[in-house]
Image: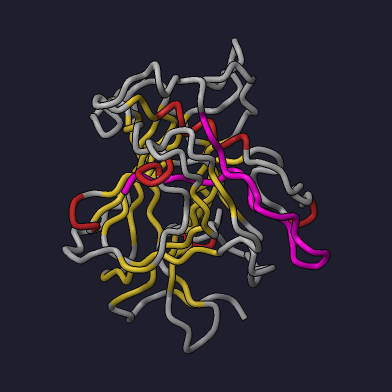
Amino acid sequence: MAPQSNDTEETFDLEIEITGISLFLWGEGRKKVDIVMPDATQDTPQPKHPNGDNAVPHAGYLRFDLRNLATGVIGLPTPGPADGPSYEVVHRFNREELQLGLPDAQTEILGELAVPDFTRFAPVREPIPGLLAAEPPEVVLMRTRLDGGEFSTVLDVVEWKILGDLRPDQQPTTAQYGGEIKWRREVGGPGLLLRIVRFDGQGTIEIPLVPLKENPGDRPSIRLKIANLCENPLEWPELARPRPPVSDVDFRCLYWLMQPHRNFDIRKYPLSVCPVPEPVRVPHPGEGDLQDCFPGQVS
């Protein structure tokens, strides 16, 4: 059965999945959180991590279902597997801000964002200036803001540890993290107008979307995905690769967005020291693959 448009519903669910290397910057009162992607696209010369290693190229993109376009597309059948739209539209970010066009929620963001927290494992580092400026530093690929709503995180099958090299007490941080985050908010109105605005002011893309419900009785929804990934960035199941139980070295890209805290001595915590999540144990057969390209947060 073809999806039904939202002609009479007063509200719909906006659902956004976020995965890959990005930094969540919490606002005061946890009512807002800004998401900043570092630019790890292939470049010449190839980007390097603070310790001198070459950075693996990543693709940052927005994905949405073609069926949600307000203009409509004739002849699309019912959706395919639940892990992604069969007819997807992909926009690759290039120094842009994604504006969701939502009113201020004035409520705290609920749920759990279970990703590594620089405030805990690296309190001697802080975000570089200008990440939220109108035209942020060149290292920023994309930025967007979430307001209100609720987080849920798909936790990994094992615990991860981050060495305490950037903590005054030198103690490691151990927790169960997740690399797949979902954010949901109930939205009023007939649809959503996404705006993708270049940081340099040289262009704006507007994408009008309408919510759909797959079957009668379902809540109408718009589902988006924001990602910054290496290897099979579109995550098609036909091209899936097992993730080996090794350290997440791509996490070092987030250090491009951080600097030494003004109250600490850079000689004691040099820029080349960039601890990353390491699995505490190897998963048992059948437990599943480990995460990769973890996001981070500053709480």
Left or right for 106, reference 163: left
Q: Is residue 299 left or right of residue 70?
A: left
Q: Position of residue 260 (x, y in %)?
A: 34, 25
Name the residue at 35% across, 44% down. 119
Of residue 187 and residue 122, the one placed in the foreground of this image is 122
Above or below for 43 versus 127 = above
Work out which quarter of the rendered image holds the N terminus and state it: bottom right
Q: Residue at x 36, y 19 (%)?
A: 266
Image quadrant in which you'd find residue 20: top right
- The magenta stretch is 274-299
Residue at 25% in and 54% down: 32
Is 245 within the magenta? no
Q: Nearer the viewer, residue 67 or 242?
A: 242
Rendering coords of residue 174 (x, y %): 52, 53
Residue 278 included in the magenta stretch of the image: yes
In x, y percent, where is residue 268? 40, 21
Q: Position of residue 213 (x, y in %)?
A: 49, 77
The foreground one among 257 and 196 is: 257
